[in-house]
Image: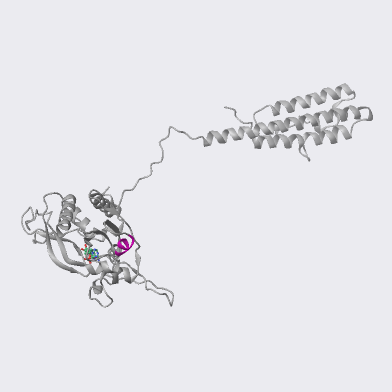
C-alpha cells in the first residue's frame, strides 16, 4: 500500500539548499547557461519531492514550501535571483522563472488530485462493508398471550362458518345500552359503570368507552339482514377496581348467529363444539339460568374444571385450588337473542331467531394457561411474556 509522504522536519520538504537565499552573484553565476542549469537543479529537487506519495496535509506543506508567499522558493528566487540579477542575466532569469512557475503550478495541481484520490481510497477501505461479518440480530417479539387466545378462538369459529367483525371502542349509550334493551335506569347499568368522554358543551350525544362487545350485535344487524354469523374480538372498559380477576380494561369476544330457524339446540351444540375444541374433548359443559336484558332465555355457561378433571379434588389430594372444589368453572354469559332487540334493528321478531354469547378472554386465558393474576397481562414484564412465545 502507498504510504503518504510525511514531512518530518523543515528539511524534509525544503525547497532550497540555501541557494535560493543567496544572490546569483554570491553563487558565482554570471552566464545565461549557468542560469539554465541552476533552474534545472531547482526543478529536479522539486520533482523529487513532488514524486513521493502525498496525502492532503503533506501536499499543502509542499505547496507552501514552493509557492508560499513569504518564504516559498519562488518568492526567494524572485527576490534574490531575479530582482538582484545583473542586466545581462535578467532576461534569462525571468524566462526560467516563468517556466519553473508554470511547472510548479501544473505539477502541484496534478498532485492535489492524486492526494484526493488517495484520501478517497483510504476512506473506502475504512468504510468498506465486510459481507462475511455476522449481521446484527434483532430480537423478534411474539404475539401477546391475549392475541394468541383471540387467534385460537377465531380459528375455531372460522371453521364453523363465522366471520370476524370489529367495532368502535368509543360508543354511544344507545348502542352500548338502549338498543340492547337496557334503558336508562335499568339496574344492569350499575354492573357496567364506565368512563364517559369529556365533550364540548352542547354535544348531542354523550360518548363512553364500551363496557362489552355486545353493541356490535346491533351495529352488525343494522347493516346486515339474516343470516348473520359473526364474532367480534375487542377491548372493553369498566369502572371495576383492579384485583386478581378484574381489570378496568379487558378483552371480550362477542358471538352472534341469527337466521330464521336457529334453535336452542344449535346454540348449545355450537358452544359445546367451541369449548371442546378449546379445552380438549374430555371437558363437560353445563348451563345455568342467568339474566341479560338482551337474551331470553339467558344462561351462564360452565365447564368441568380442566385442572382436576371435574372432580373438585386436586391431583395431590385436597381441594382443587382452581375450582375451589366446585368441580365446575363459570365460563361466560350467553343466550337466545331477546325478540325486543330485533325491534331496534328492524328485523321481524316473528321470523328471526338466534343466539349470542360474550366471552371474557382474559379470564379464559387465565383458566387455560394457569395464570392466577389478570394484572400480568398488562404489566408487560418480559419474564411473563417469554413464557408464551
Ligand atoms: C357481558 O358483558 C355480556 N355482554 C355478555 C353476553 C353477550 C351475554 C351476549 C349474553 C349475550 P358480563 O358482564 O358477565 O357479560 O361479562 C362477560 C365476561 O367478561 C365475564 O364472564 C368475565 O369473564 C369478563 N369480565 C367482566 N368484567 C371483567 C373485568 N373487570 N375484568 C376482566 N374480565 C371481566
Q: Which image quarter holds the N terminus?
A: top right
Ligand 1 placement by image quarter: bottom left
Task: Tell me: 230 left or right of 266.
Answer: right
Location of residue 162 with respect to 30 vertically, above or below: below
Residue 246 percent location from the top left of the image: 24, 65
Q: Quadrant of residue 353?
A: bottom left
Residue 355 percent location from the top left of the image: 21, 61
- Residue 294 visible to an observer of this rendering: no
* The one of 175 and 131 positioned closer to us in this rendering: 175
Q: Quadrant of residue 249?
A: bottom left
* The one of 300 and 5 positioned closer to us in this rendering: 300
Q: Main secondary structure of the magenta part?
A: helix
Residue 159 percent location from the top left of the image: 23, 48
Residue 360 percent location from the top left of the image: 23, 60
Region of the chain picked out in magenta, as a range: 218-223
Q: Is residue 221 magenta?
A: yes
- Residue occupying the far right of the picture: 87
Q: Residue at x 58, y 32 (%)?
A: 121
Q: Residue at x 78, y 24 (%)?
A: 41
* The one of 38 and 97 positioned closer to us in this rendering: 97
Q: Residue at x 54, y 33 (%)?
A: 125
Amino acid at each position: 500500500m502507498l504510504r503518504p509522504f510525511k514531512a518530518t522536519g523543515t528539511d524534509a520538504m525544503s525547497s532550497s539548499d540555501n541557494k535560493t537565499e543567496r544572490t546569483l552573484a554570491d553563487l558565482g553565476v554570471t552566464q545565461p547557461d549557468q542560469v539554465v542549469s541552476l533552474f534545472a537543479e531547482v526543478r529536479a529537487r522539486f520533482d523529487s519531492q513532488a514524486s513521493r506519495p502525498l496525502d492532503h496535509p503533506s501536499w499543502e506543506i509542499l505547496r507552501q514550501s514552493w509557492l508560499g508567499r513569504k518564504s516559498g522558493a519562488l518568492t526567494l528566487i524572485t527576490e534574490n535571483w531575479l530582482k538582484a540579477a545583473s542586466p545581462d542575466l535578467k532576461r534569462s532569469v525571468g524566462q526560467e522563472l516563468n517556466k519553473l512557475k508554470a511547472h510548479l503550478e501544473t505539477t502541484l495541481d496534478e498532485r492535489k488530485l492524486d492526494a484526493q484520490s488517495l484520501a478517497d481510497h483510504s476512506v473506502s477501505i475504512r468504510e468498506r462493508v465486510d459481507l462475511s461479518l455476522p449481521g446484527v440480530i434483532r430480537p423478534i417479539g411474539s404475539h401477546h398471550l391475549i392475541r394468541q387466545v383471540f387467534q385460537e378462538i377465531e380459528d375455531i369459529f372460522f371453521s364453523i362458518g363465522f366471520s370476524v367483525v370489529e367495532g368502535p371502542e368509543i360508543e354511544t349509550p344507545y348502542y352500548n345500552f338502549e338498543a340492547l334493551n337496557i334503558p336508562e335506569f335499568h339496574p344492569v347499568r350499575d354492573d357496567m359503570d364506565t368512563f364517559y368522554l369529556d365533550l364540548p358543551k352542547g354535544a348531542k350525544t354523550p360518548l363512553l368507552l364500551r363496557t362489552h362487545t355486545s353493541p356490535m350485535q346491533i351495529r352488525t344487524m343494522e347493516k346486515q339482514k339474516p343470516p348473520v354469523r359473526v364474532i367480534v374480538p375487542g377491548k372493553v372498559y369498566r369502572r371495576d377496581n383492579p384485583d386478581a380477576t378484574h381489570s378496568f380494561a379487558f378483552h371480550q369476544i362477542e358471538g352472534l348467529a341469527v337466521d330464521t330457524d336457529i334453535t336452542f339446540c344449535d346454540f348449545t351444540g355450537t358452544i359445546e363444539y367451541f369449548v371442546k375444541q378449546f379445552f380438549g374433548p374430555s371437558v363437560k359443559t353445563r348451563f345455568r339460568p342467568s339474566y341479560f336484558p338482551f337474551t331470553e332465555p339467558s344462561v351462564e355457561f360452565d365447564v368441568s374444571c380442566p385442572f382436576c378433571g371435574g372432580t373438585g379434588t386436586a391431583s395431590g389430594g385436597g381441594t382443587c385450588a382452581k375450582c375451589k372444589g366446585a368441580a365446575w368453572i363459570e365460563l361466560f354469559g350467553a343466550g337466545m337473542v331477546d325478540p325486543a332487540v330485533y325491534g331496534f334493528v328492524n328485523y321481524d321478531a316473528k321470523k328471526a331467531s338466534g343466539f349470542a354469547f360474550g366471552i371474557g378472554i382474559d379470564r379464559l386465558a387465565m383458566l387455560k394457561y394457569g395464570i392466577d393474576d389478570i394484572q400480568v397481562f398488562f404489566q408487560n414484564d418480559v419474564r411473563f411474556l417469554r413464557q408464551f412465545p
